[in-house]
Image (spheres, coloured by chain):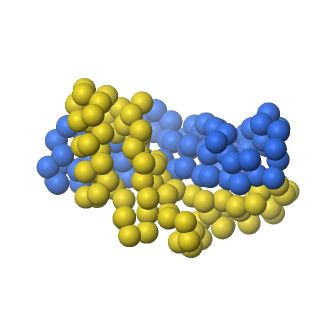
Chain colours: A yellow, B blue
Amino acid sequence: MKARVHIMLKTGVLDPQGEAVRHALGSLGFDGVDGVRQGKVIELDLTESDPEAAKAEVTKMCEALLANTVIERYDVELV
Amino acid sequence: MKARVHIMLKTGVLDPQGEAVRHALGSLGFDGVDGVRQGKVIELDLTESDPEAAKAEVTKMCEALLANTVIERYDVELV
């Protein structure tokens, strides 16, 4: 079973990477961009085949390692 | 209109970040992980309101700046 985790900075946390991308897009002539936020996506191949157990396991991984829950939010999606 | 872009290394391109995450998960006792790939996700706030035009614009941004199409693949999703 495959899982995909999105990890983004929480709203209100400064995102200098996103700001740099927004600025660079503006320099290239892409004017219709109001805001950019950049985050991480992590794709996991799991041996677990039960969807509920897999989701619970990945949530534990996020809390333990993948996300810094002080400043980041994550969401887990099975694919 | 909001768009989300996923940028992942192409299959076959070495992903040391993903490997490091897999190794760290193993050290923490998460044994059911066969593979990990890590990529970027970029969320864009666009002024464009037509979905087709927005998607075309974001695809141009990916080709020009966001993705390195030699080693990365991207997909654009409107949210």
Residue with the most extreme left position: B29
Please, which residue is most extreme toward the front here?
Answer: A52
Residue closest to the eye, B27 or A3: A3
> Looking at the image, is B2 positioned above or below residue A10?
above
x 25%, y 51%: residue? A60
The correct choice, above or below, for A33 with respect to B18 in the image is below
Dividing the picture into quarters, in which one does residue A23 lie?
Answer: bottom right
Tell me the quarter of the picture where residue B37 sits: top left
Count of all numbered marks drawn on residues in the image: 0
Question: Could you say which is closer to the camera, residue B48 or residue B5?
Answer: B48
The C terminus of chain B sits in image quarter = top right
* A42 relative to B70 in the view: left or right: left
Instruction: Give the vertical position of A45 relative to A36 (above or below).
Output: above
Q: Residue at x 67, y 39 (%)?
A: B78
- Residue A35 sits in quarter: bottom right
Tell me what residue is drawn at x 20 percent, y 37 percent.
B32
Q: Is residue B56 left or right of residue B36?
A: right
Position in image of residue A62 (x %, y %): 32, 53
Relative image position of residue B1 (x, y in whole percent): 74, 47
Residue B66 in view here: yes
- The percent position of residue B40, horizontal first and vertical second, equals 52, 50
Q: Is residue B15 visible?
A: no
Instruction: Tell me where residue B18 appears, x and y as whole percent.
Output: 36, 47
